[in-house]
Image (cartoon, rainbow, N blue to C red):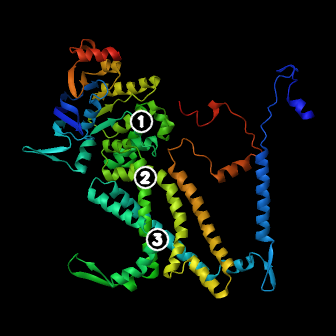
């Protein structure tokens, strides 16, 4: 082949002998990568085809396989939107209570007092050791069965307020309670990992300045622990958004239950599952983006130069039409220069 | 300024300090030298109660550290009271321990703002002055890990000075530095000594000890082996153990 002779010097010379000052570098070829890429493209085309163009005859009428028309009809339907709202409320409440409880339990577990750390350990053991669905059902059914009346007052003494359990603990309250208390157990382990990850020298430096233990925790340790805490917490939030669908088992009309209600009436089971999935995907995508920026915020001081956000990369790419990308010598890379 | 009488400290069954007697006068610079494991860093950490002592008494500026005496009983002080006495003692660590999530300026302002609840404006001015004094006027907005070790240690000194301490403790301040950055940090410390600050310095820099110290204390195995003027301890040590140590490091 003619291209081969252009790249390789004559065999006899064994070096740069044909008057040229440099040789051409021939990159290694990756045939398997190409094959895999083609395979992926074919699969993608098949997926797109089946999602969009494919048709099916059901009950004598020919219609789109995925019935996107039905999906579209219910996507913003009022009952569905009310379900979306309930799902979001439960997620926010469960995560807010869960994180606060998690911080409290983590501090208790790290306490020098055996009783405090033991109590936290027992809590985590119990709530991690039983399924959420069981806990949810317990809060909804079990509490009013065991304690028909809840009282607030002096321990072993007089009661000041008495509540009727069934009116106080509605399905929504039971759902929020169950998810929050369960989340607290998981969050406490995440927070504890974050606190342990902060170097002990930080607490010593804070103490040597005269900061109290609570100041040290609030001002020095927790802000640094956040870097370790945020990624798994984002994970937990996304997980919680979907776990809330379990409350449909205790008669809370969340997003999933709302779509179930509709499909129970019109038998369009699959399109309404798609409606639910699209909403869950939409909010998990939002959370993923949010997590990215929160992580960036807490990375201050941890990495010397933050990488640009996707948005910054896009704007800088648009500003210079062609990225010239000159290969700079090491000393000219901007973040190396300020450090001597 | 510092008065130690028979200070003892054990970690589990290992006795690290076996009765330390030491006196540091106001404005005096004392250098603690000795092999690693001799207890010098532990003793330094006892002075501001980062470590609790198991026996003896330790007083700074006439007040017991971490305890209150009533008759023959020593009552452990509450967290808040310990904090108040620590605020008067500055400390510089071997590994700097700057707060990585705060800028250099915020690191220096942290103590006065949060512990003394000082107003922001004057605190900022004073912090900037201190950073200028340690030669880092152009690094106020940087974060600690954008600085070299020597620069970080100078920020740490400024951070300690921002609390207006009456005593400064240095725990091997140059041991984690590249050799060529040691000089800058030692210069700042020499300035500080010249300005009349009372300082206790755990160090392996014999040159610094010889030049700046009023007293050099040689510790080994939890005991003070000998102490005296640098010209005596470092040049004509009385004890064989001191001589063999100096022979290795000089």
What residue lies at 31% left-to-right and 21% top-to-bottom? B209
Q: In this view, does A178 lie above or below B207?
A: below
Judging depth in this view, the residue of A251 and B188 nearest the camera is: A251
Picture quadrant of residue B73: top left
Nearer to us: label 3 or label 1: 3
Instruction: Tell whether label 2 touches label 1 (CB within 8 Å).
Output: no
Residue corresponding to mark 2? A193
Q: In this view, does A160 lie above or below A194?
A: below
Secondary structure beneath disc 3? helix
What residue lies at 43% left-to-right and 28% top-to-bottom? B177
Q: Is residue B12 above or below residue A75?
A: above
- The disc numbered 3 marks a residue on which chain? A
Residue corresponding to mark 1? B155
The quadrant of the picture occupied by the N terminus of chain B is top left
Nearer to us: label 1 or label 2: 2
- The disc numbered 2 marks a residue on which chain? A
**Cα separation between marks 1 and 2:** 29 Å
What residue lies at 46% left-to-right and 71% top-to-bottom? A132
- The disc numbered 1 marks a residue on which chain? B
Residue A282, percent from left and from top? 63, 67
Residue B142, percent from left and from top? 50, 40
Residue B201, percent from left and from top? 30, 28
Residue sitting at the far left: B71
Instruction: Characterize the local packing of mark 2: few (<14), some (14-19) or many (20 or more) Cα atoms within 10 angstroms.
Output: some
Q: Is residue A185 left or right of residue A320?
A: left
Residue sitting at the far top: B236
Secondary structure beneath disc 2? helix
Q: In this view, does A49 lie to the left or right of B228?
A: right
Q: Is residue A321 visible?
A: no
Mark number for residue A132?
3
């Amino acid at each position: 082949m003619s291209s081969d002779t252009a790249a390789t010097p004559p065999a006899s010379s064994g070096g740069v002998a044909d008057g040229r000052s440099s040789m051409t570098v021939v990159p290694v070829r990756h045939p398997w990568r190409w094959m895999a890429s083609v395979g992926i493209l074919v699969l993608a085309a098949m997926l797109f085809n089946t999602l969009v163009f494919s048709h099916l005859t059901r009950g004598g009428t020919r219609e789109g396989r995925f019935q996107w028309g039905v999906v579209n009809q219910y996507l913003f339907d009022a009952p569905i939107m009310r379900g979306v709202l309930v799902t979001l409320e439960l997620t926010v409440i469960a995560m807010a209570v869960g994180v606060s409880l998690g911080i409290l339990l983590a501090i208790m577990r790290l306490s020098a007092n055996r009783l405090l750390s033991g109590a936290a350990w027992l809590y985590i053991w119990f709530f991690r050791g039983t399924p959420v669905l069981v806990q949810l059902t317990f809060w909804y059914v079990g509490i009013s069965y065991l304690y028909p009346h809840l009282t607030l007052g002096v321990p072993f003494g007089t009661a000041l307020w008495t509540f009727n359990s069934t009116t106080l603990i509605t399905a929504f309250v039971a759902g929020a309670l169950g998810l929050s208390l369960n989340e607290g157990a998981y969050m406490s382990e995440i927070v504890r990992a974050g606190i342990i990850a902060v170097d002990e020298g930080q607490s010593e430096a804070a103490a040597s300045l005269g900061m109290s233990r609570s100041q040290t925790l609030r001002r020095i340790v927790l802000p640094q622990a956040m870097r370790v805490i945020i990624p798994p917490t984002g994970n937990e939030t996304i997980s919680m958004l979907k776990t809330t669908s379990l409350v449909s088992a205790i008669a809370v009309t969340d997003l999933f239950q709302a779509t179930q209600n509709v499909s129970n009436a019109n038998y369009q089971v699959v399109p309404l599952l798609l409606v639910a999935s699209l909403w869950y995907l939409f909010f998990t995508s939002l959370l993923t983006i949010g997590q990215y920026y929160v992580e960036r915020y807490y990375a201050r001081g941890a990495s010397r130069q933050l990488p640009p956000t996707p948005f910054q990369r896009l704007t800088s790419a648009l500003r210079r039409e062609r990225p010239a990308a000159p290969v700079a010598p090491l000393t000219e890379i901007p973040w190396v220069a300020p450090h001597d | 300024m510092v008065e130690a009488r028979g200070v003892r400290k054990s970690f589990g069954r290992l006795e690290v300090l076996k009765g330390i007697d030491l006196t540091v006068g106001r404005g005096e610079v004392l250098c603690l030298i000795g092999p690693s494991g001799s207890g010098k860093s532990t003793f330094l950490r006892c002075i501001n109660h980062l470590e609790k002592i198991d026996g003896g008494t330790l007083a700074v500026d006439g007040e017991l550290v971490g305890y209150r005496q009533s008759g023959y009983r020593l009552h452990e002080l509450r967290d808040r009271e310990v904090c108040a006495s620590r605020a008067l003692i500055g400390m510089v660590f071997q590994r700097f321990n700057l707060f990585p999530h705060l800028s250099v300026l915020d690191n220096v302002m942290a103590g006065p703002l949060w512990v003394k609840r000082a107003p922001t404006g004057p605190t900022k001015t004073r912090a900037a002055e201190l950073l200028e004094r340690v030669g880092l006027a152009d690094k106020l907005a940087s974060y600690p890990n954008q600085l070299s070790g020597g620069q970080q240690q100078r920020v740490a000194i400024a951070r300690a000075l921002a609390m207006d301490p009456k005593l400064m403790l240095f725990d091997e301040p140059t041991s984690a530095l590249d050799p060529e950055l040691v000089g800058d940090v030692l210069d700042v410390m020499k300035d500080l000594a010249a300005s009349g600050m009372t300082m206790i310095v755990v160090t392996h820099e014999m040159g610094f000890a010889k030049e700046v110290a009023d007293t050099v204390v040689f510790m080994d195995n939890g005991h003070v082996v000998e102490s005296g003027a640098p010209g005596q301890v470092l040049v004509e040590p009385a004890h064989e153990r001191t001589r063999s140590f100096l022979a290795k490091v000089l």
